Image (cartoon, rainbow, N blue to C red):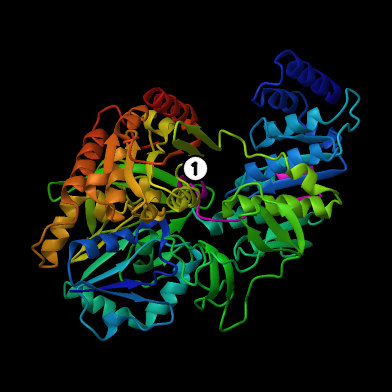
Amino acid sequence: MKIEVLYSEVANLYGDLFNIHYLEKTIPNLTVYYTSLNDKPKFVEHKIDLIYMGPMMERFQEVIINKLKPYKKRIKELIENDTIFLITGNALEIFGSKIDDIKALGIFQYYSKRDFSYHHNSCFIGEFNDMKIVGFKSQFSYTYNNKNNFIKVINGYGMNEQDNNEGIRYHNFIATYLIGPFLIYNPPFTEYLLKLLKYDGNIAIKEAVYEAYNIRKEEYLADNLNFKH
Amino acid sequence: MFYVSLWLSKLYLFLTKNKMNDKAGSLALKLDKNFYRHIKKPNIVIAVTGTNGKTTTCNFLVDLLEKSGYKVTSNKEGANFLPGIAKALMKGVTLFNKAKVDIAIIEFDELGSKKVLPLINPTYIAVTNLFSDTMKRNAHTDYVFSKINEGLPKDSILVLNADDLISSQLGQNNKKIYFGIDKLKTDTKVNHSLVQDIRVCPKCYTPLEFSYFHYHHLGKANCPKCGFTNPLPKYNLTNIDYQNKTITINKEKYLLVNDSLFNIYNELLAITILKEIGVKNINESLKTLEIVKTRYNKIKIKNIEVISQMAKGQNPIAVSRALNYAKDLSGNKEVIIILDDIYDYEALDRSEVMSWIYDSDFEALNDPSIKKVIIGGFRAYDYKVRTLLAGVAPNKVFTSRSEVDTYKYLDLKKIDKVIIIHDIYLNKKALEIISKIKGELE
């Protein structure tokens, strides 16, 4: 099985690369390609099972948009053909139509707006496919006009202050603002992702991640908590 | 209105016997909106900020200057924002607003630069370093860099860390003095830490080539494409002699205060500033310099050394340094970790972001000399997952919802040292654990 991690020298904030380290601990014989800004992405010419990109400082979004622009057609084709993408944090904004006035890849029509005067932090619990999803948000931007919802909000913020849905799901393109790392904090979803990857082994340290997940899930479902502030 | 403000705040300070809070400063600012403009500042104002080490550096500076005979005011008894700084300045003048101190040492928050610096117009602004910090507040280094930069007065001299390719780029138009640590035996060619806040050239985005790392991104690098590299330090630490407890800066020997590189940077910065303002006989003052006991304490109970090391929770660099420090200590050890954000947990609109544990080097705990990792607090289960992912064997990891009860898992007959890594607000719990250990051993 092959995973490509895009631009981890800059898209590496908030411990989110542990999404990949966790998959490495879970799946034996996994090949992970770390593609640097100077490299041609592997997915252009090779079959990759999962393409990952994580959160970054905002100035790198434009750099990455320019790096990926030549491969826009290929990315679209991969998405339509059900290649799995896992995109976390503000990396998802790169695939929309624009970020403020910066023209993004335009693969989806959603757009994002930054506000450096307000740094949003919140906890989150939501639901996807009968699974409870937990996580955190820490960001300067919101995204609007997303048509491909991923997680229904139970408590917390969606893609923006009004949206009741979090993340993007289109074919197997999965993107979310939730950091965590998402896969470690959400073992049921990770098991779902493994099914998509056609891998039938157990997730790593299953008992411990489920214990932490169950405690957090119960805590976040409490009626007296309000993550919207 | 200024004198009313000055006198009443001084009276308040006198009546409340200089409590560790900023109420006198708040009062002064409330009574005179232009308090900062009116208050007489000492001849030299030194402002210190940065992700890690600013409090310790300020404490060093205050102690060393006072031991050298200078009269000093500082905000070390208060917070590092406007009221705390107002209180420090107010303490530095007479009832008739005449400066009665030579120097003010002001710690300021990185995000407060724009509000604080123009009001105090520092002679020197020292920045210890810039790293990933509490993400809830500080987001990332670009954000903090821009926040510091936007407040720098043009006449202030910046004292910057040459080994830090991020903070060394501050203040394009300011005069700058750099301090740095030369290549050391303990350096690595590869960065073994998870976080490295700069990996590509800030000018052309080409991957940087590092010739060595001290820790995280501190070290020496250059860009193979455009030549971007570290500035040259005016104050260059060339040797650390751990045995004889000395450091060498520009060929002069100084006493080593604490053997962690983290604190050696703080000492180097303090010495840099002292040299710049012409302080003599620095070694004489260094002899009796200590790190504040709430931050680091070492006691021997029977045959066991118990070390408490404060590490700001949610700060991946501080926690990584503490974890590595525990690993590097000699002997067999058990490590207690209590780092929860107790205030956030009690809030109904909580906004904890636990991701920082995945930016912290828990891998350091995966060392044969560490016999147990005992984690206390309501987030113990998250830390347990992190510790297991670092490769620590499950039979070595213990959790307890109660911080103090962690001591019950210690196996004091089999070890030489206990290291308690605790958050800034869990100092009391760390002391309770120490007294429980005392009870067990005595």
Q: Residue furthest front?
A: B303
- Depicted B396 relative to depicted B428: above or below: below
From the viewer's perspective, tell me whether residue A48 is left or right of residue B231: left
Q: Residue furthest bottom?
A: A45
Q: Nearer the viewer, residue B224 or B149?
A: B224
For image coordinates 58% across by 52% down, the residue present is B262
For image coordinates 26% across by 76% down, the residue present is A76
Check disc 1 and report the residue beneath it.
B311
From the viewer's perspective, tell me whether residue B199 is left or right of residue B148: left
- Depicted B22 relative to depicted B307: above or below: above
The range drawn in magenta is B116-138
Would residue B358 be visible to someone looking at this image? yes
Quarter of the image holding residue A67?
Answer: bottom left
Mark 1 Cα-neighbour bin, 10 Å: few <14, some 14–19, many ≥20: many
Please provide percent x and percent y for residue B400. 29, 33
Kind of element beneath mark 1: loop
User: Looking at the rendering, in which quadrant would you find the C terminus of chain B?
Assistant: top left
Q: Nearer the viewer, residue B95 or A158?
A: B95
User: Looking at the rendering, in which quadrant would you find the N terminus of chain B?
Assistant: top right
Q: Is residue A51 magenta?
A: no
From the viewer's perspective, tell me whether residue B310 is left or right of residue A221: right
